[in-house]
Image (tube, helix red, strand yellow):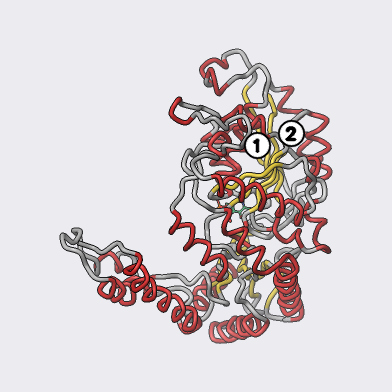
């Protein structure tokens, strides 16, 4: 039998704490992107579960030999793909404690501390972002969930529809629902629309300008046209920090349109929103004071292990109206005095995610967090200037934050197709070095390489080394 005493936890946890310490010491020696082939990890693991208990030493040995070679090191200072999610030590310790407590914060009563800590830390976070008190916050796992729930709340806010109660079957004769997001909005908007029963046909993509920002006049035109054609516009999603280029939709203008049309405005600031804690970047959330909801992921740029996403909304009551279903066994004496977070979303059980916010904000302080993000923004500008000055590369989008979109333009290659092939090969070669991981997007049909600078361990020397690797691989390929 396995010994479950505190003494055993002491002995075995030391093995793991030592392992984690060694991992971070050696992190930079690992290839950022593993070179394993599909199926390789699976082929090394037994097909059936072990009947007898195995020791932690045996498990760790397989972790080292089988799992580690297949791990992509998101914490590596030269992980610059997608939108980074890097974990700080207070974030890691908070996760450890969350697992140790193993609470379920569905109700205030089921764990008063997680409920009240969530309320307090979200109030802190709201102030750090410069959002006013009318915004109430809730933690979910991911931005995809936050946005889906905002869409459901927007749907619920419609008078005369009662879809929660009656379902879409009772909609016969009523105008179909339509929502709007820019052509560069994230796929989670479409998924939210699928789940909310709006359907992909119910999502109208609004054209963007040359800076990849939604064009408000096009939004206005689409709404007018849709109304004339029998649709019911009910929700707009503006993006602050789009996934490909971090472009920023003009929220003040979009908010004005939503107000005059009485449409719910949700702002997707999953990655970029955190940057608004830097005083000179507060403009990122201009206009959000007139939005109905906004999602920001601390796990993307606030150094907490995935997952933690925050939805702020001005309509706590509508969210509750959309989701609350209280069976007898979950009724408590305190229901009228407290927040029972299970009432505000699809999930019943809830992890102790507020610990991550609490630990990270306290350990760094707001000033410490501002300093790290400000440095990322400086490094972004620096990298941008290197591309600008190089004859071999060109920028393919503005750099409002610290995500740089560019491609190589070797003088001998003249056609767009060949340029796309060259840049894809260049990125693959860069990633094959194992020293850095970059990802791509397509902008105006052009294969675009992205460098994202938002990892907590990323320093100027890393950014310089990445630029050197890009140049070395460029010269090897031409
Ligand atoms: N919104 C934007 C702008 C994103 O870039 C992403 C992911 O990168 C998401 C939403 C989805 O985030 P999540 O993985 O937390 O669902």
Mark 2 residue's CB less than 8 Å from ligand 1 = no
Secondary structure under the numbered disc 1 in the rendered image: strand
Seen at 40% across and 77% down, the residue is 19
Q: Is residue 379 above or below residue 362?
A: below
Q: Is residue 402 left or right of residue 357?
A: right
Seen at 58% across and 38% down, the residue is 149
Q: Quadrant of residue 334?
A: top right
Location of mark 2 (residue): 222
- For this orientation, the residue located farthest to the top is 173
Secondary structure under the numbered disc 2 in the rendered image: helix
Q: Is residue 187 visible?
A: no
Location of mark 1 (residue): 204
Q: Earlier in the sequence, mark 2 or mark 1?
A: 1
Q: Residues within 10 Å of mark 2 (few under 14, many from 20)?
A: some
Q: Residues within 10 Å of mark 1 (few under 14, many from 20)?
A: many
Residue 328, x across and y down, in percent: 45, 25
Residue 423, x across and y down, in percent: 57, 71
- Mark 2 near mark 1, Cβ–Cβ under 8 Å? yes
Mark 1 residue's CB less than 8 Å from ligand 1 = no
Residue 441, x across and y down, in percent: 59, 61
Residue 62, x across and y down, in percent: 28, 73
Quadrant of the rendering where the N terminus is positioned:
bottom left
Q: Is residue 246 left or right of residue 100?
A: right
Distance of label 2 from label 1 (alpha carbons): 8 Å
Looking at the image, how many numbered discs can be counted on the residues? Answer: 2
Q: Is residue 299 above or below residue 477?
A: above
Q: Is residue 409 visible?
A: yes
The mark found on residue 377 in the picture is none
């Amino acid at each position: 039998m396995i010994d479950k005493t505190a003494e055993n936890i002491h002995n075995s946890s030391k093995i793991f704490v030592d392992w984690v310490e060694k991992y971070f010491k050696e992190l930079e020696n690992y290839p950022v992107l593993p070179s394993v082939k599909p199926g390789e990890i699976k082929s090394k693991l037994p097909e059936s579960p072990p009947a007898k208990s195995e020791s932690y030493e045996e498990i760790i040995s397989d972790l080292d030999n089988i799992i580690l070679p297949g791990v992509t090191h998101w914490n590596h200072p030269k992980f610059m793909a997608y939108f980074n999610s890097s974990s700080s030590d207070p974030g890691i310790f908070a996760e450890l404690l969350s697992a140790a407590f193993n609470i379920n914060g569905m109700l205030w009563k089921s764990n008063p501390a997680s409920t009240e800590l969530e309320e307090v830390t979200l109030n802190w976070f709201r102030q750090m972002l410069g959002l006013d008190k009318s915004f109430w916050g809730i933690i979910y796992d991911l931005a995809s969930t936050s946005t889906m729930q905002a869409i459901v709340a927007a749907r619920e806010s419609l008078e005369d529809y009662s879809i929660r109660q009656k379902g879409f079957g009772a909609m016969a004769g009523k105008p179909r629902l339509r929502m709007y997001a820019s052509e560069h909005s994230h796929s989670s908007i479409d998924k939210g629309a699928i789940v909310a029963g709006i359907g992909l046909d119910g999502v109208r993509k609004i054209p963007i300008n040359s800076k990849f920002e939604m064009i408000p006049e096009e939004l206005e035109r689409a709404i007018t046209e849709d109304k004339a054609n029998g649709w019911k516009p009910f929700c707009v999603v503006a993006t602050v920090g789009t996934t490909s280029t971090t472009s920023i939709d003009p929220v003040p203008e979009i908010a004005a349109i939503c107000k005059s049309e009485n449409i719910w405005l949700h702002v997707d600031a999953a990655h970029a929103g955190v940057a608004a804690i830097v005083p000179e970047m507060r403009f990122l959330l201009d206009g959000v004071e007139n939005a109905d909801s906004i999602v920001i992921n601390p796990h993307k740029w606030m150094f907490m292990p995935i997952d933690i996403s925050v939805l702020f909304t001005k309509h706590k009551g509508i969210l509750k109206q959309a989701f609350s279903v209280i069976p007898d066994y979950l009724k408590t004496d305190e229901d009228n005095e407290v927040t029972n977070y299970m009432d505000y979303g699809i999930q019943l059980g809830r992890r102790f995610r507020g610990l991550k916010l609490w630990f990270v904000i306290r350990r760094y302080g707001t000033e410490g967090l501002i300093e790290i993000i400000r440095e990322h923004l400086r490094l972004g500008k620096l990298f941008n200037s290197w591309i600008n000055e190089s004859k071999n590369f060109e920028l393919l989008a503005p750099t409002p934050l610290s995500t740089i979109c560019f491609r190589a333009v070797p003088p001998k290659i003249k056609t767009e197709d060949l340029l796309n092939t060259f840049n894809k090969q260049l990125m693959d070669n860069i990633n094959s070095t194992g020293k850095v991981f970059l990802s791509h997007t397509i902008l105006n049909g052009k294969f675009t390489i992205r460098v994202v600078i938002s990892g907590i361990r990323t320093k100027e020397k890393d950014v310089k080394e990445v630029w050197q690797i890009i140049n070395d691989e460029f010269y090897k390929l031409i």
